[in-house]
Amino acid sequence: MGLFSLFTKEIAIDLGTANTIILHNDKIVVDEPSIIAIDRNTKQLMAVGKKALMMHGKTHDDIKTIRPLKDGVIADFQSTEMMLKEFIKMTGTKGYIFPPSLKMVICIPSGITEVEARAVRDSAEQAGAKEVRLIHEPMAAAIGIGIDVLSPVGNMIIDIGGGTSEVAVISYGAIVTQKTSKIAGDNFNENIIDYMRKKHNIEVGESTAEQIKFNVGSVIENLDNPPDDYEVCGRDILRGIPITVKVNYREVAAALEHSISEIESVVLSALANTPSELCADIYKTGIYIAGGGALLRGLDKRIAKKTELQVHIADNPLKSVARGTGIGLKNFDKFPFLIR
């Protein structure tokens, strides 16, 4: 550790709608849900991350849980600042002589406005950052997957997160074509909640919908290795008592049909707006999918069928964006696409 590093702490932050991941010294030191719990009366922070998520939907009137980010952008500035400060504390200060000056690279959606980007930067500065660079999510995902983004070759990235789905074509270290949709993980949960209400007359919450998606989530109705049916507990709408029902992957595919069709349309629109020479590259390299949505069973087959292109699911797609943001941190003053 050099003398300068004794006073400066470098961290990379994937600030997501659903989860926040922080890297320090190439290691993930924070991986927590993007949620806080506060006391409604005193406005004091009660819990953050996993502890706050455990309280979500289970609290009394004096406690309020807040997800500070919506659709990939900051919806509640003060809550985001509180959350970031707590997450940064989790990274520790061991090895530093004095409280370190923070140097950050933060991932942001490619479709956000300058005002929204400024809100991210301001939140980071209020949380203690002295130097901040921003990186767009599709670029970070591409770097995290292992793509040489500075090469003169076109690559298409689909990043399906909690709040947004982004489709981008990258070449020469820049995003040439990009399309953003607000159809993403949160919408998938809403689709599942609606389906359970209409088809099974059972009321379930966000956390249960997330578990359904994880255990039997699929976008096609014929899987080679289908998961076992998943038992769901919720409240019977008609009788008001707790009951259990079993859900299979075909039902989830039906529930998500409209949302996945919307994402397919965004992908086709991005391809239609891509220069022909880059389309030729994409024909050879295929399409890469990252983000939590990449874990939906059959998504690669469905996108491949729709586009007639090869589709690759990133290794550990949940961490691709964070990994790419970390590489951006290493190249803080070198990568031309990092936003000052």
Image: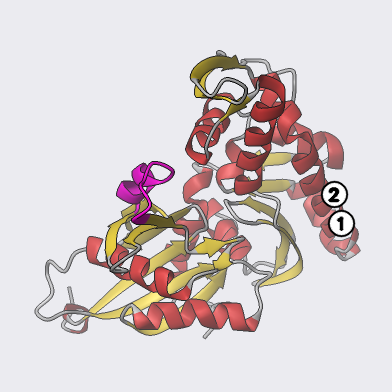
Relative to residue 229, is residue 322 depicted above or below? Answer: below
Q: CA distance from mark 2 to mark 1?
A: 6 Å
* Residue visible at 81% across and 41% down in the picture: 261
| Residue behind mark 2 | 265
Residue 288 x %, y %: 67, 47
- Look at the picture and state if 167 lies above or below 209: below
The reply, left or right, for residue 118 in relation to residue 248 is left
Q: Nearer the viewer, residue 249 or 206?
A: 206
Measuring from the top left, give residue 304's x and y in whole percent: 79, 37
Q: Pointer 1: residues within 10 angstroms few (<14), some, or many (20+)?
A: some
Q: Nearer the viewer, residue 121 or 157?
A: 121
SS for callout 2: helix
Q: Is residue 119 visible?
A: yes
Q: Amino acid at mark 2?
A: Ser
The residue located at (50%, 31%) in the rendering is: 211
- Circle on res. 91: none
Quarter holding residue 238 = top right
Q: Which residue is mark 1?
A: 269
- Helix, strand or loop at label 1? It is helix
Q: Residue 335: x and y, percent? A: 53, 77
The kind of residue tagged 1 is Ser
Region in magenta: 49-63
Judge whether residue 192 is colored magenta.
no
- Mark 2 packing: few (<14 Cα in 10 Å), some, or many (20+)? some
